[in-house]
Amino acid sequence: MKIDTPVVSRELERVKALATYNIDYETLQDKFSDLTLLAAHITGTSMSLINLMDADTQWNVSRNGIDLFCINKEDSICQYTIKSDTDFEVTDLRSDYRFSEQNYIKNSSLSYYYGVPLKTKEGFAIGALCVLDDENPVLGRKQKNMLQLLAGEVISRLDELKRIAVLENKIQLLQVERRMLAHDIRGPLGGIKGLAEVAAEEGLSANKNELLHYLELIKDSSQSVMELADEILLNERQKRALPPSDGQTNLLQLKKKIEQLFAPKIKDKDIDFEVYVSELTARQPINKHGLQQILGNLVSNAIKFTPKRGFVTVELNLVGEEQNRLLKIEVKDSGRGMKKDVIDAILENGAISTQGTGGETGYGLGLQLVRQIVAEKKGSFEVTSTLGHGSSFTITLPAW
């Protein structure tokens, strides 16, 4: 039987709304564990989840009583919840044709599901708070209303995390500006110092002693400023040896994050997956805003269109001078490849909807979101592909 996937109105806007939170999906368990635990206590169920839904994947960011990190969006129950205005309930998952053939249902005793959408202030459902159980509990209206309140608290905490991230990003930009200022002042002050040295050496016939005294002061002052600039630059170099702050990441951390996020999907399709980073710049801090959304969608797309026992590779490099450093991201796969008209469509609007090699649904939104983020960052986006021989996506962004 063909299963119809629910169509969510304004889906691109919904995915963009989630992307604005710039969420690291692996870091939210502790921040929301109290809410998932409370949801289970309120309903008397054995399991509860907070799920966030991007273009292709459901990320289970906080879990209670169940070990599940991510599944394909099209395989999830919560895809129906985010379509709902208020809630979505299934009293017998094992007899419901939409879910009965899913592995996480067939290989478990799960029977009951109840979920409420996580809606932003603009009305976009970016995920769901849900409870599950092996039995079939009867939830009263008061219990359901309390879950609605918990869903509002989830959004409030996400909004607060976003505000903190914005402030941290502003602080980091100020630090970058300070480093650039130090570079800028060294040149002119070096000239002043050189002029003072020449004047001090040659002297002038009129009021020579007094003039020499002033010139020596200029020399000493310029030297002090030079030392200050050197000290600022030294402090910045020393900071690179420290772990990045919350608003930063580096290539090594980015590599680890991508490997962890997609380990379940890689294992499921038996794909050879490698992430390469430049050793020379692997530990230098970069602004992480938007990177997980970009890499997440590119890698998810590559996995989707790569057959079993194929390969997907990711290359991460920092290129260019320190003050104008660029992050270069290249994602390659051995998938089915694309025709020229498909590549043109991607470059024009990012929208393409096809079925993956494992039957996965192509929502056509991931690449569109990537293009928009790259454009906002004033980066470049390139696609090359040969039909039957795979594709390559190359993105270049300012590192700050």
Image: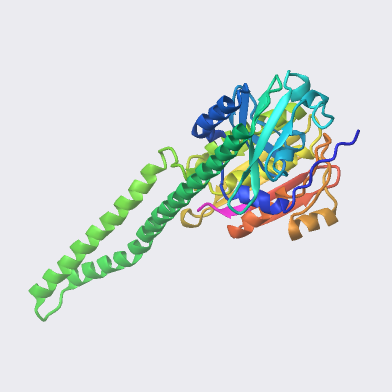
* 165 lies left or right of 42: left
Above or below, comparing residue 66 to residue 118 in the picture: above
Quadrant location of residue 297?
top right
Residue 82 versus residue 176 in the image, above or below: above
Asked whether the viewer can see residue 52, the reply is no
Answer with left or right where residue 237 lies relative to residue 226. right
Boundaries of the magenta span: 396-400
**Residue at image coords 44%, 54%:** 170
Q: Nearer the viewer, residue 218 or 300?
A: 300
In this view of the protein, which residue sits in the foreground, 214 or 359?
Answer: 359
Q: Judge whether 362 appears above or below 397 on screen.
A: above
Q: Is residue 392 left or right of residue 214?
A: right
Q: Residue at x 34, y 48 (%)?
A: 234
Residue 348 x %, y %:
75, 60
Determine which quarter of the picture holds residue 261: top right
Q: Residue furthest front?
A: 141
* Residue 219 sits inside the magenta stretch: no
- Quadrant, the N terminus: top right
Q: Nearer the viewer, residue 47 or 63?
A: 47
Query: Would residue 107 be visible to someone looking at this image?
Result: yes
**Depth check: 202 or 328 in front?**
328
Q: Main secondary structure of the magenta part?
A: strand
Up-down relation of residue 361 to residue 220 (above or below): above
Which residue is found at the position 52% from the left and 30% from the top? 33
Q: Position of residue 329 (x, y in %)?
A: 63, 47
Query: Quick one: which residue is furthest to the right in this view?
Result: 1
Q: Where on the picture, by quarter, is residue 107?
A: top right
What is the x, y in percent for residue 300?
A: 71, 40
Residue 144 place in picture, x, y as percent = 62, 34
Let me know if residue 399 is in the magenta part: yes
